[in-house]
Image (cartoon, grey):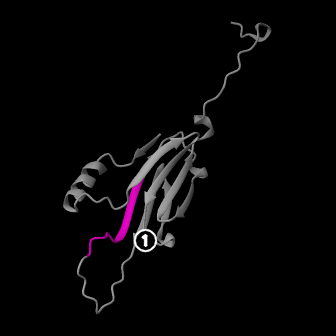
Amino acid sequence: MLMRFDPFAELDRVTREWGTRGVVAMPVDAYRLGDRYFLHFDLPGVDPESIDITVDKNTLTVTAERRWEVPQEAEVVIAERRHGTFSRSFYLGEGLDQNGIEAGYDHGVLTVSIPLADQAKPKRIVVESKDKALRR
């Protein structure tokens, strides 16, 4: 139901990480609980106003920006934290309700909740009694 969008993204990610000591800019955990999928993105130090979540043609894209403004007269001794714009995309399967997506940001963690569409939810089929049984 919920998959990474780009099949080649894993190769690109590994290549980028190899050059950056294995640091992922926007790590995410995803799981299903009941009738919803949850995505948790680690975005410490990100201004919530910079977070942009869009859905376009079954693709959910999360973009965020972390800024670092160093005083002009400062001498930077160490600069290891990642800054700039980060983005992740996920393919939303047919069984997800794109109109019911919700998001919240708390203590540096962005949580996106994606509900199952009604047609993807399990349905109970009632077995009719002998009097109402289907006839050929």
Q: Which residue occupies the extreme right position in the image? A: 131
Residue for point 53% across, 63% down: 105
Question: Residue 129's image quarter?
Answer: top right
Q: Residues within 10 Å of mark 1 (few under 14, many from 20)?
A: some
Residue with the mark numbered 1: 45
Q: Which residues are magenta?
A: 79-89
Residue for point 55% across, 58% down: 103
Question: Residue 20's image quarter?
Answer: bottom left
Instruction: Say above or below: 46 vs 32.
Output: below
Instruction: Say above or below: 50 vs 109.
Output: below
Q: Secondary structure at mark 1?
A: loop
Question: Residue 88's image quarter?
Answer: bottom left
Residue for point 24% across, 87% down: 75
- Nearest the viewer among 108 and 13 is 108
Residue for point 25% across, 83% down: 76
Percent x, y for residue 56? 49, 54
Q: Which residue occupies the extreme bottom position in the image? A: 73
- Nearest the viewer among 78 and 32 is 78
29 left or right of 118 in image:
left
Q: Is residue 88 magenta?
A: yes
Instruction: Say above or below: 69 vs 46.
Output: below
Q: Is residue 52 magenta?
A: no
95 left or right of 6 in image:
right
